[in-house]
Image (spheres, helix red, strand yellow):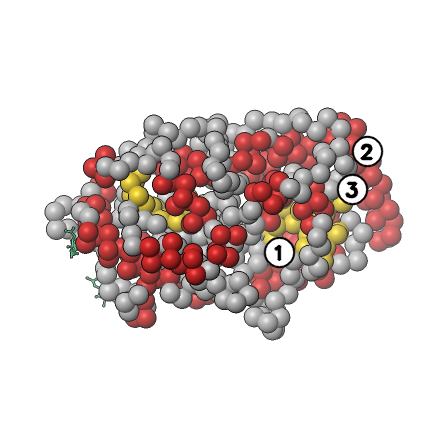
Amino acid sequence: MKNLSWGFILLVFSAFLLNLDAFELRKGQKTERISGSAGDVLEDDPVGRLKVFVYELPSKYNKKILQKDPRCLNHMFAAEIYMHRFLLSSPVRTLNPEEADWFYTPVYTTCDLTPNGLPLPFKSPRMMRSAIQLISSNWPYWNRTEGADHFFIVPHDFGACFHYQEEKAIERGILPLLQRATLVQTFGQRNHVCLKEGSITVPPYAPPQKMQSHLIPPSIPRSIFVYFRGLFYDVGNDPEGGYYARGARAAVWENFKDNPLFDISTEHPTTYYEDMQRAVFCLCPLGWAPWSPRLVEAVIFGCIPVIIADDIVLPFADAIPWEDIGVFVDEKDVPNLDTILTSIPTEVILRKQRLLANPSMKQAMLFPHPAQPGDAFHQILNGLARKLPHDKSVYLRKGEKVLNWTAGPLADLKPW
Ligand SMILES: *[C@@H]1O[C@H](CO)[C@@H](O)[C@H](O)[C@H]1NC(C)=O
Ligand SMILES: *[C@@H]1O[C@H](CO)[C@@H](O)[C@H](O)[C@H]1NC(C)=O
């Protein structure tokens, strides 16, 4: 019975590859318009729609930290650095804070890497507090709204909860001083204490030039059905199993390691980027956090992302119709992944591929340097512009205080 059904699946699969080859990949360029719940906004130009004031901070909050560890420039958290550089020379920047719609504080809170490159967020809360203390005592704008017209880039695993373990992150919650600010973060999960209403979820940083240099001709067929490279277990941090990826990655391995439709392994080959371009589906399961750079890579390489991360909120979710582009599989349904993917009709797959082929879709996932129209920087600005004008209620009465400066874990209150 089992063999029979595999034979059938392979038959369907090859028929469908032939289809792809004949109708889509040879032509290569067919695309489809991207329209999200906020409308056709990916190609909006933010210039003229908002003005941003960039606080000037001592270099110990940004440049000096980067000097100490240049690896931060290539890390998946690098958006905090590139966003700063981008804003400094952006036409939306204003030098006159009186006319600003938004205030930006350039702190590189995630640039603190262990020798093997893992970012540790233990100092981040103190550093963030210190920066806010500084701007609130040197300029009048913070006190006016206690941060409601300020935005912060917090690209750590669980955003401004500043911990890489979910339970600890939840226990900590969002740093109390950021309760009123708009947070621009990679973390996105519905009904989670680390994602507050009004935040902007962004893609993680993935190196644009490097990906560009691995592009292969679009005529090369997608002969891999499902592709994944990465950990299935994290024995070092989760020796008993079950916590890491809430068991979803382990389930992928245990159910499909011998399945010929699944090209999955922990080995990261040098042809990783090329392989994604030869695959129809790329698995994007949660790890410790729900998000990972795989989503960006899948979009850039036209591989349909299979999202396995319950309640995830994907980047620029009001501008990008992710439900049409990706495939969403509940964590509990991982054992049925083969049936789920093989039963998607060919027309549906082709449509997803056309959406992925849209250049504005790819552009929105990248932080290129120099910046380009429609890239992730511009999408962040568009998102901020769509929040304007600020509601009158964000402006506090003179002397009114809402935030509690002594709330949160005691260790966070120590000077930075
Ligand atoms: C903002 O309020 C704090 C007290 O909450 C005060 O110490 C600070 O001086 C105020 N900043 C300005 C610029 O007035
Ligand atoms: C601020 O938070 C601290 C610590 O949680 C608490 O003891 C204090 O009562 C709070 N202050 C106000 C005004 O809510």
Question: Disc 1 to disc 3, how far (Cα)?
Answer: 28 Å
Residue depicted at 54% across the width and 35% down the height? 363
Q: Residues within 10 Å of mark 2 (few under 14, many from 20)?
A: some
Question: What kind of element bears circle 2?
Answer: helix
In front: mark 1 or mark 3? 3
Question: What kind of element bears circle 3?
Answer: loop
Give the residue at mark 1. Answer: 332
Give the residue at mark 3. Answer: 223
Residue depicted at 35% across the width and 50% down the height? 106
Give the residue at mark 2. Answer: 18
Q: Earlier in the sequence, mark 2 or mark 3?
A: 2
Where residue 288 appears, as percent x and y from the top left, is 54, 61
Q: Image quarter for residue 33?
A: top right
Q: Earlier in the sequence, mark 1 or mark 3?
A: 3
Q: Can the viewer see residue 317?
A: no
Where residue 16 appears, as percent x and y from the top left, is 79, 35
In front: mark 2 or mark 3? 3
Q: Amino acid at mark 3?
A: Ser
Across the whole image, how many numbered discs are drawn on residues? 3
Residue 196, labelled with which disc?
Answer: none
Question: Disc 2 to disc 1, how far (Cα)?
Answer: 32 Å
Q: Image quarter for residue 58?
A: bottom left
Q: Quadrant of ligand 1?
A: bottom left
